[in-house]
Image (tube, grey):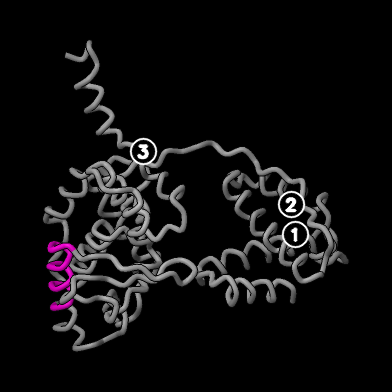
Amino acid sequence: MLVEKFIDYLKLEKNYSSNTLSAYKRDLIQYNKFIIENNSDLKIEKADYKIIRSWIVSMVNNNLSNRSINRKVSSLKSFYKFLIKTDTIKLSPLKAHSPLKQSKTIQVPFSKEEINSLLDSDFFNNDYKGVLQKTIISFFYFTGVRRIELISIKESDISLESGTIKVMGKRSKERIIPILPKLKKSIKNYRDIKSKLLGKNPSEYLFISKNRKQLSEKFVYRTVNEYFKLVSPKIKKAPHVLRHSFATHLINEGADINSVKELLGHSSLSATQVYSHTSMERIKEVFKNSHPRAK
């Protein structure tokens, strides 16, 4: 009951997305299940730090990464803050908790050459699925949207006349992204094929499957991963890497970081600064041209 009230609070007062709500709920259900299995009579609001610590140890023993464990504990921390806010408890059992140490990983964006070689290739079929997949990849790179934002784009959000896309981001924050000529051409081509195959106005969503259903996040992930395997040796080939590439390439070409922040839909500049690290290609170029022994 308390978990449901907490999820309602996040949904109604915090405007969290359905994906975020699902993640919070999943974490709390897993934690509650652990309590029941190990302390059958104990209620979730009565658990102390000893129980939480045992849960953390069990996750470590199950080879869960420190990053994933910290995220789950963060969900728990928010839950106990809510319980304090609603006078259910007086103190959070996580008050003195310190997160597990995480190794910093630098996410490497796709290079301009990798992206151009894919989009200019003949890897994509000329049927509906091929055109859909190519448009999805183009859309990611030309807009920098998140995966959930892409599949949620509606036909009414696109205005080719004014050259803009309306995107609903995290916490229902709306932003406008300009449409560049090449993306405009891709969208028009996709729309033409979609209307020929599926008829006029087959769905409110821009990107749909052949059975007129909204695309799944899994399909979108698989599309990016499978095609970039053909042109890139990078380990991670996910939609978020295209978002990273969008931001990194803009900043490397001299775009103002505050403008990039608005395009990405970030609430703080610190989130955008993650992408401001110069790409490895740029570092190599500067190194080659500037080091006295490089010539």
Q: CA distance from mark 2 to mark 3?
A: 36 Å
Q: Which residue is mark 1?
A: 34
Badge 3 marks a residue whose secondary structure is: loop
Mark 2 in CB contact with mark 1 (< 8 angstroms): yes
Tell me the distance, in whole angstroms, between the alpha carbons under discs 1 and 3.
41 Å
* Residue 155 against residue 217 in the figure, above or below: below
Secondary structure character of the magenta stretch overall: helix
Q: At which x and y percent is residue 45?
A: 81, 65
Residue 26, quarter of picture? bottom right
> In which image quadrant can residue 83 be found?
bottom right
The foreground one among 256 and 284 is 256
Query: Quick one: label 2 or label 1, which is nearer the N terminus?
Result: 1
The nearer-to-camera label among 1 and 3 is 3
Instruction: Decide if residue 211 is on the left or right side of residue 35.
Output: left
**Residue type at the position of mark 3:** His
Question: In terms of secondary structure, where does tag 1 sit?
Answer: helix
Residue at figure coordinates x 35%, y 41% from the top left: 108
- Residue 110 falls left or right of residue 72: left
Query: What span is in magenta?
Result: 180-192
Q: In which quadrant is the C terminus drawn?
A: top left
The magenta stretch spans residue 105? no
* Extreme residue toward the bottom, this view: 200
Q: Which residue in the protein does label 2 denote?
A: 55
Q: What residue sits right under mark 3 in the picture?
A: 277
Nearest the viewer among 80 and 42 is: 80
